[in-house]
Amino acid sequence: MARRKKKIKNAKKPDSNTDELAKQIKKVSKGLYYISETDAEIFPFIGNKAEAVTVKEVLKQTERVAETPVEERDFTEFFTHLTQIQDWFGEEEMAMAQKFSDLKDLLEKNLKDLKVFKVGKIQLDIYVVGLNTENNLMGIQTEAVET
């Protein structure tokens, strides 16, 4: 599946803190894929200033209509199945779970009010976002297919 990046309308040039965090997210998420009925790459999401992390704000910053279906999920719950070690894991699965744990830690350390938004039906865009120190909406984005 080709990755689809949503362009942010009127996005301002990121400040140095935002730019640095985006680089860290890109580095930590390199090689990570969100597994659903398809495997989708995980990459940084950099938005604009926001007063709060809300469905309305995410739809606005991803240029979606207000009627677009959105499911809000808990940040910790989202990462639980990605970071949980199973007794059948081999080295590759263990390394992947650790990378997801590192990504979760990076987001928690640098962003506040973290939330997960699944946007759309069946073919979903997933945004795991919070506010950085400059109140920019940022985090990660990926895709999923859920039938």
Image: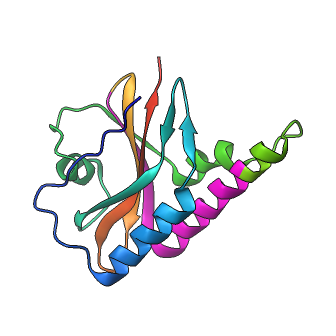
Main secondary structure along the magenta-highlighted residues: helix
Say whether residue 118 is magenta: yes
Give how far across and how far down residue 111 sits, in percent.
44, 70
Is residue 33 toward the left or the right of residue 63 in the image? right
Residue at 40%, 77% in the rendered image: 20
Is residue 30 toward the left or the right of residue 134 in the image? right
Q: Quadrant of residue 44?
A: bottom left
Give how far across and how far down residue 22 sits, in percent.
40, 68
Residue range corresponding to the magenta coloring: 96-120
Q: Residue furthest right?
A: 87
Is residue 89 toward the left or the right of residue 118 in the image? right
The correct choice, above or below, for 86 with respect to 26 in the image is: above
Give how far across and how far down residue 7 sits, in percent.
20, 50
Give how far across and how far down residue 110 sits, in percent.
48, 74
Residue at 35%, 63% in the rendered image: 138
Q: Quadrant of residue 9?
A: bottom left
Say whether residue 72 is magenta: no
